[in-house]
Image (cartoon, helix red, strand yellow):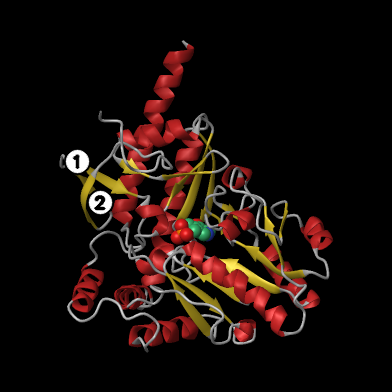
Amino acid sequence: MADATPLYDTYARAPLRFERGEGVWLIAEDGTRYLDFAAGVAVNSLGHAHPHLVSALKEQADKVWHLSNLYEVPGQESLSRRLTEATFADKVFFTNSGAEALECAIKTARRYHFAKGQPEKFHIITFEGAFHGRTLATIAAGGQAKYLEGFGPKAPGFYQVPFGDMGALKAAISEETAAILIEPIQGEGGIRTVSKEFLQELRALCDEYGLLLILDEVQSGVGRTGKLFAYEWAGVTPDIMAVAKGIGGGFPLGACLATAEAASGMVAGTHGSTYGGNPLAMAVGNAVMDVIMADDFLQHVRDVSLVFRQGLASLADRFPEIIEEIRGEGLMLGIKAKVPSADLLKAIRAERLLAVPAGENVIRLLPPLVTTAEEAREGLARLERAAEQLTAERRQASA
Ligand SMILES: *Cc1c(COP(=O)(O)O)cnc(C)c1O
């Protein structure tokens, strides 16, 4: 029977099978070419089969694949140095995924207060609509009932306040609060941008109460918003930050970054990972940084973002029955649909354009950062045809 698969039934997969990728394109088994603005949910930051990444991985594959953290790994030293030189951070812990980067961030914050003689300070305040991963701690941090249900008691120490509600946030702070955790732009939540002012107020609040500010830049980081990290737009810095997705360009890689002070509790033996900082991952992570840190690369992201934003604004004007609102920064863009977003997603897929669903009836456009202006216009043309098609269908249905 074709429908009996030994795979867990946890994913609602689209019936598409891709054989290979080239830049912003994915090529299906039957040869059909799709414009990939899903980019593996913001992971394929440099598109598919980027020559510099391919050669870095192949070169490392011929040398050594895995060492564990029993020994020094030179790739970890170079990548951590580059990350700390480019950010607020002094210290880096490498992981294999976003959720693990968040686990490290949460442990780092709790351990900081523990080491200061305040073990009662372990509560983390998060925001409604957040997504921080699928481990037991990160579903508690995300606070979404649909991800928590049936998995036993919610991990203790996570408290959630409404998105953007400073009053509720202040009221939630107690003697037991260790940290505030927030995505500068909620991804899964529906491309909801936290205002610059709100992030600045969060920083001030954390300083006032001796709390640590943890940013989840798993999706918004590594050039996605046109800065290396989204926090740069607000001119404030966190104490701890979780990074993953784009940093590996498709190779499983994450990192937890922290100031020396925030990481001061994480002494020898307090944390570990078998694969974290694996030589293959380090080779690719360093190669991603070569490209993203090159002169003008982030300017390119901002320029292409403008092409998208202007095109999307014009589509929103012309198809008010289909599009309610355009959201986001850089190449982390959202289309809030008037029609069910699943219909819009299906219509654009029929035009061989790929995007990602999100909360609040939004579809996410997360094109590779190497997308050219011409490829952006091609995507916009496909979106336009999908909107025309949906409009025609709706008129027919109501006639
Ligand atoms: C994807 C994501 C995560 C979880 O990353 P995984 O690699 O799936 O564990 C956490 N936070 C944010 C903001 C994400 O987008």
Q: Which mark is residue 271?
A: none
Residue 234 in sight from this viewpoint: no
Residue located beneath label 2 in the image: 25
Residue 291, compared with residue 35, is above or below; it is: below
Tell me: 132 left or right of 282.
right
Mark 1 neighbour density, 10 Å: few (under 14) some (14–19) many (20 or more): few
Mark 2 neighbour density, 10 Å: few (under 14) some (14–19) many (20 or more): many
Tell me: 18 left or right of 286.
left
Instruction: Identify residue type, mark 1.
Output: Thr
Looking at the image, is mark 1 or mark 2 earlier in the sequence? 2
Residue located beneath label 1 in the image: 32
Image spot of residue 161 (x, y percent): 73, 54
**x 58%, y 71%: residue:** 105
Image spot of residue 141 (x, y percent): 63, 58
Quadrant for the N terminus, please.
top left
Does the residue tagged 2 have its C-beta within 8 Å of any atom of ligand 1? no
Foreground of the two, 196 or 145 = 145
Residue 77, compared with residue 232, is above or below; it is: below
Q: Residue 48: which quarter of the image?
A: bottom left
| Helix, strand or loop for disc 1 | loop
